Amino acid sequence: MDTQNNPDMEPELPAELQGRVPTLRVIPMLPDSNPNGDIFGGWILSQMDLAGASRAHQYVRGRIVTVGLDAISFHKPVFLGDQVSFYTKVFKTGTTSITIKVESWAMRHTSQKAYEYIKVTEGLYTYVHIDQNRKPAKIHRE
């Protein structure tokens, strides 16, 4: 898709995102940035946790808590004006836990009329399914 001739359209998704729908999409604001205009890594990690928790909650159909994050890689910075999409998939499940892979992609202005998608961050978030007493609960899938 040529966004230079049709600037109202989103750029074509990279091949690895074709057919995928973001779990969360946000635009970072000024309070989320450092003095250089880069978005704080902690802000990105918290958004990734929200996206991962949403996917985990849908999967277990119940309450979950974050218990860990692993293999976090910051590939590129996120800037003010980027629109950041968070893509998730179930990576691994256990008896009471679920690990979600979260990828962050920035839709960035690359010229006055063009955009592109750039993978900025990825990582693994682990959640535990809990019952009403906040004790680990078995994940039941039909």
Image (cartoon, rainbow, N blue to C red):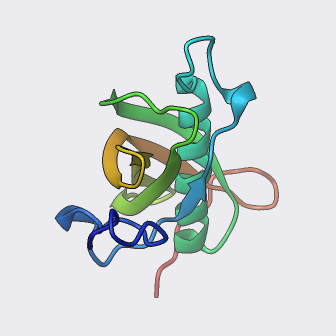
Q: Quadrant of residue 121?
A: top left
* Residue 76: percent from left, percent from top: 34, 30
Please name the residue shown 46% across and 88% down the image.
142
Q: Quadrant of residue 94?
A: bottom left
Query: Can residue 138 be seen from the camera position used here?
Result: no
Q: Residue furthest right?
A: 133
Above or below 52: residue 126: above
Q: Residue furthest top?
A: 35
Give whichever of 7, 24 is nearer the camera: 7
From the viewer's perspective, is residue 87 above or below residue 108? below
Residue 137, relative to residue 44: is it above or below? Answer: below
Task: Decide if residue 109 is on the left or right side of residue 33.
Answer: left
| Quarter containing the N terminus | bottom left
Total marks placed: 0
Task: Report the front residue among 88 and 58.
Answer: 88
70, above or below 125, in the image:
above
Percent across and percent down for residue 10 are 42, 68
Q: Can residue 116 be seen from the camera position used here?
A: yes
Q: Position of residue 69 (x, y in %)?
A: 46, 34
Counting from the top left corner in percent of width and height, residue 3 is at 34, 66
Residue found 32% across the figure and 53% down from its top: 116
From the viewer's perspective, tell me whether residue 78 is left or right of residue 53.
Answer: left
The residue at the point 46 percent across, 44 percent down is: 125
Looking at this rendering, what residue extends furthest in the left direction? Answer: 15
**Residue shown at 33%/52% (left/top)?**
117
Residue that extends furthest to the bottom in the rendered view of this protein? 142
Choose between 16 and 138: the one closer to the eye: 16
